Amino acid sequence: MHVGFWEADAHLLHAGSDIAIQPSRFEPSGLTQIYALRYGAIPIVARTGGLAETIIDANEAAMAARVAVFNSNPTPSKISTMRLTAR
């Protein structure tokens, strides 16, 4: 059993995903959301740090975008964001 990070496996995980949820409280930059976009997965991210800077929210007026952002703490915000994304 290996405990650690294998980059090839991380890429396979993103490539096989439809949605990438990243509920970080602190994220200085991060590549997870960029990898998700690269492989066609919809990134659902917390509105914090680098996530808020690299992902623009897809709201009712801009549903052509394939991303979603929720506020860091409130759970109802996360649920409504996921429902909007599922449409």
Image (spheres, rainbow, N blue to C red):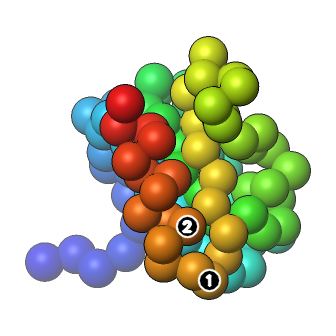
21 lies left or right of 62: left
Q: Residue 38, relative to residue 76: is it above or below?
A: above
- Secondary structure, mark 1, is loop
| Residue drawn at 48 percent across, 72 percent down | 76
Q: Where residue 77 is drawn, which disc sits there?
A: 2
Task: Say which quadrant the C terminus sits in.
Answer: top left
**Mark 1 touching mark 2, by CB under 8 A?**
yes
- Where is residue 18, by image quadrant? top left
Q: Where residue 73 is drawn, which disc sits there?
A: 1
Q: Is residue 65 visible?
A: no
Between 76 and 53, the residue placed more toward the observer is: 76
Q: Tell us which disc is closer to us: 1 or 2.
A: 2
- Residue lying at the far front of the rendered structure: 60
- The amino acid type of the residue labelled 1 equals Asn
- Secondary structure, mark 2, is helix
| Residue drawn at 70 percent across, 24 percent down | 62
| Residue drawn at 64 percent across, 52 percent down | 69
- Where is residue 63, by image quadrant? top right
Q: Is residue 72 visible?
A: yes
Report crowding for label 1: few under 14, some 14 to 19, many 20 or more residues within 10 A (C-alpha): few
85 lies left or right of 30: left
Between 70 and 52, the residue placed more toward the observer is: 70
Q: Residue 21, relative to residue 36: is it above or below?
A: below
| Residue drawn at 42 percent across, 51 percent down | 82
Label 1 and label 2: CA atoms lie apart by: 8 Å
Q: Residue 53, relative to residue 85: is it above or below?
A: below
